Amino acid sequence: MRLTPTRADKNEKVKNVNLSTALLNPSSIHGGLYAPTKLPKISAKAWRDLSALSYEKLALAIISLFKFDIDEASFKKALRRYKNFDRPNIPVEFKRLGKNLYINELYHGPTRAFKDMALQPFGEILSKLAQKRGENYLIMCATSGDTGPATLQTFANAKNIKAICLYPTGGTSEVQRLQMVCMPGENLKVFGIKGNFDDAQRALKTLLASQNFKSELAKNRLLLSAANSVNFGRILFQIVYHAYAYARLLKLGKLGKNESFDIIVPSGNFGNALGTYYAKKMGAKIGKIKISSNANNILTELFTTGIYDLRNKTLVKTISPAMDILLSSNVERLLFDKFGAVRTKELMDELDKNKFYKLKAHELAALKEDFEANFCTDEECEGYINSWAKKGVAIDPHTATCLKMVDSSRINVITSTAHWVKFTPSMLKACDVKVKGGEKEGLKKMAEILNDTVPKAIDALFDAPILHPEVIAQSQIENKILEWIKK
Ligand SMILES: *Cc1c(COP(=O)(O)O)cnc(C)c1O
C-alpha cells in the first residue's frame, strides 16, 4: 500500500509515496500530510483469531495487512522494543474498572506516557531506514512534557540519528524535566527555553524555515525529519492498541453478537483518536469515538458545531498540559478520509488564511456518525482524580478528562495516556493533600495514598547526574544547535 497527500487542487495529479518515504519526509505537497486512502478490512472471523494473540503478534498481524514497503522482519524487530516495558509481553494493561467500564493503560513504557507505544518501535524503524540509505537525520521536537522524554528515549544512541528537544523552562513537571535533562546518549541534546511552550514551538518552526539553518545542516550532511504525530509512522502503531481493546473484549466474551462499544480518548493533536478511527474502519466494533478535551476545547466545538475557530482564542494552561493545543494537526487526516484531498486543502487553506473554517451540515453529520466530543475543566478533573483515588485507582489529569463522557448503559473503554507520577503536584492538589518538601516527598505521599509504588526509574531521576543543564534565550537557539551539530 502507498500513502497519499492529504491536500490537492482540483484535477491535480498527486504523487503517492511508500511508507519509508513518508517516514523520512512526513510533509506532503501544499503543506499537507500523508494518509492511506483505504484501510485493510478485517472480517469477524479474523478478529476472533486475532483476539487469541499476544500484543506483539496482534500488532504484527495488523501492520502486515497494510502491505507496506518495510518488511515484516523489521517490524518484528521494532516491536521487540516492548520488551522494555513493565511487563515484557504485555505492553498495554487492559483492566475492568466497573460495570461496563474498562481502562486501556498505555503508559507502561520507559517514559510513562502513551507516546512510548508508538515512539519506541518508530525509533527503531527510522534509524534502520536511515542506515540502509546511508543518510543522517536530525529530529527536533518542542515539547510540553511528554513528547520530549519519549523522543529522546527512543533515539538514544540510535545510529544515523541525532535528536534535539526544546522544552519551556518551568513549563513541564519536575519529573518530566529530569527525564529530559538526565537522558544519556551522545546523539542527544536538550535545551530549556526561556518562555512557554508556544515560544518553544514557534522558535522551532522559525528554525525549520531558516535557509541559513538548512544550508548549515546540509554542510554537515544532515537531513531533517519529524517524530511528532504528523509522521504517519506514529499513527500506524497507534491503531494497534485500540484494536487490542476490541480483541480483549472479544476474548473476555463481553460483547454480544454485533454489539459495539465506545472508546474515550483524551485528545490534543488527535493522533491517538485518529488511531481509534482507523481501527474502527478496519472493522473493530467501535460505536462512538468520544473526544475529551480540557479547557482548550476547540475539538469539542468542531465535533458539535462543525466550526474550527482559532480567532480570539488563546491557549489556556491546564493541569493536563499535553492536551493544551489549539492547532490539532491530525484532524486533517480525518477531513481527508471523510471529504477527500481537494476539500481538505480548501478547509486547511481557510484555516491558514482566516483562522477559521466551517463544515457544511452534511459534513458535520458525517463526523457525528463516528465521533462525540466534550471537555472538562480542571476542577471537574480534580473531582474525578480525588474520587477514584479514594477507591485506590490512579487516574492522571489527562485521563481524568474522559470520565465525564462515560455512558454506563454501554461498554466504555477509557484510554489512559499517562502515569500519575509525571503529574504529582496536580494529583496531590486534587486529593487535597499538602506535603512538606519537594517533588520526591510528594511522590512518596501520593504513592501511599494510591497504595502504589513509584517506578524505580522515576525514583532514580532525583539522584541522576544532570547532563543537559543549559537554559537559553530564544535568540540563542539557532547558534547553540549549530554549535552542537558541528562538534
Ligand atoms: C500527547 C498526549 C495526549 C494527546 O494525544 P494526541 O494524540 O496528541 O491527541 C494526551 N495525554 C497525554 C498524557 C499525552 O502525552
Image (spheres, rainbow, N blue to C red):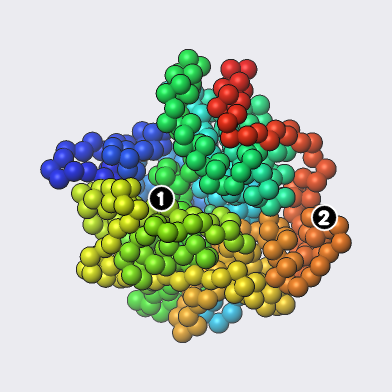
Mark 1 or mark 2, which has the lower sequence index?
1
Q: Secondary structure at mark 1?
A: loop
- Give the quadrant of residue 426: bottom right
- Residue nearest the viewer, comparing 123 with 352: 352
296 to 83, vertically: above or below: below
| Picture coordinates of residue 74, whole percent (x, y) | 47, 36
Name the residue carrying label 1.
Answer: 329
Q: Which mark is residue 412?
A: none
Label 1 within 8 A of ligand 1 by Cβ:
no
Q: Is residue 480 above or below residue 26?
A: above
In the rendered view of the protein, which quadrant contains the C terminus?
Answer: top right
Q: Is residue 92 left or right of residue 6?
A: right
- Residue for badge 2: 438
Q: Secondary structure at mark 2?
A: loop
Which quarter of the picture shows residue 392? bottom right
Q: Callout 1, which amino acid?
A: Ser
* Camera-nearest residue between 121 and 391: 391
Quadrant of the snapshot with the N terminus: top left
Q: Residue furthest left?
A: 11
Residue placed most toward the observer, 58 or 439: 439
- The single residue placed furthest to the right in the displayed view is 436
User: Residue 94 placed where, x, y %?
Assistant: 57, 65
Q: Residues within 10 Å of mark 1 (few under 14, many from 20)?
A: some
Q: Is residue 38 visible?
A: no
